[in-house]
Amino acid sequence: MTGLGSLDAVLRYHPGHYGIIAGRPGMGKTQLALGIAGGIAARHGPVLFCSVEMRGDSLGHRLYSSSYQEESRSPDPHAEPDADAVDQRAIAAWGDLPVYVDHKSRSLSDVLAAVRIAKRKYGIVAFVVDYLQKMKLPEKQSREQEIASASEALSHAAGSMGVCAI
């Protein structure tokens, strides 16, 4: 369970599951992936978030912005959210969650190594790779074959380690 009610109503992630989030640029895939990672971490245990696209500070801004959106939902739609309250909300929401972020791995082999290490070191129950198409992959005849091969390797890793992969 991710804690995202609409998603949980139609999909159950489980050990060995490999799920793909797809959409056009700017549709919120990273934000959704962070929400799923946080929900799984809160309910089931440690999660590794491998960000191939963003560095740590950019991910921090995403987490902060999700807290800002929550804080901005006040009875008075014209009131400015209190910055200190937003900071506290972000810290409260994410500070104690066992979500580990890897923003240094850029290749498939580096991501797979990070997942193996996180499984051994933290006992992760899930890992998220954001953004598969930006990952440096072993060369094949076409980009489509490269992505398919990487997807198969990530799926195999999930199955062999008994973790959920997104």
Image (spheres, grey):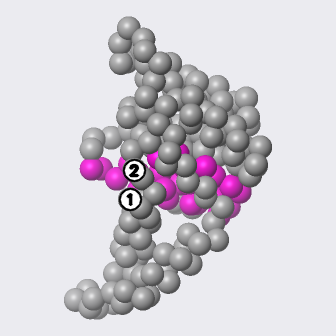
The 10 Å Cα crowd at callout 1, few under 14, some 14 to 19, many 20 or more, is few
Tell me where residue 36 appears, x and y as whole percent.
Answer: 53, 54
Asked whether the residues under the numbered discs 2 and 1 touch, taking CB atoms below 8 Å apart as contact, a structural biologist would say yes
Residue at the spot 66% in from the left edge and 61% down from the top edge: 98
Above or below 143: residue 68: below
Q: The magenta stretch spans which residues?
A: 26-51
Q: What is the three-letter code of the residue carrying label 2? A: Met
Residue at the spot 58% in from the left edge and 24% down from the top edge: 153
Residue extending furthest toward the left? 78
| Quarter location, residue 166 | top right
Residue at the spot 49% in from the left edge and 31% down from the top edge: 107
Is residue 84 shown left or right of residue 109? left
Nearer-the-camera pick, 97 or 106: 106
| Quarter location, residue 139 | top left
Q: What is the three-letter code of the residue carrying label 1? A: Ser
Q: Name the residue under label 1.
A: 58
| Quarter location, residue 110 | top right
Question: SS for tag 2?
Answer: loop
Is residue 161 shown left or right of residue 82? right
Instruction: Let me know if residue 21 is in the magenta part.
Output: no
The 10 Å Cα crowd at callout 2, few under 14, some 14 to 19, many 20 or more, is some
Tell me where residue 72 appears, x and y as whole percent.
Answer: 34, 81
Residue at the spot 64% in from the left edge and 71% down from the top edge: 96
Residue 54, label in figure: 2
Cα distance between the residues tagged 2 and 1: 6 Å
Above or below 162: residue 137: above
Question: SS for tag 1?
Answer: helix
Residue extending furthest toward the front? 104
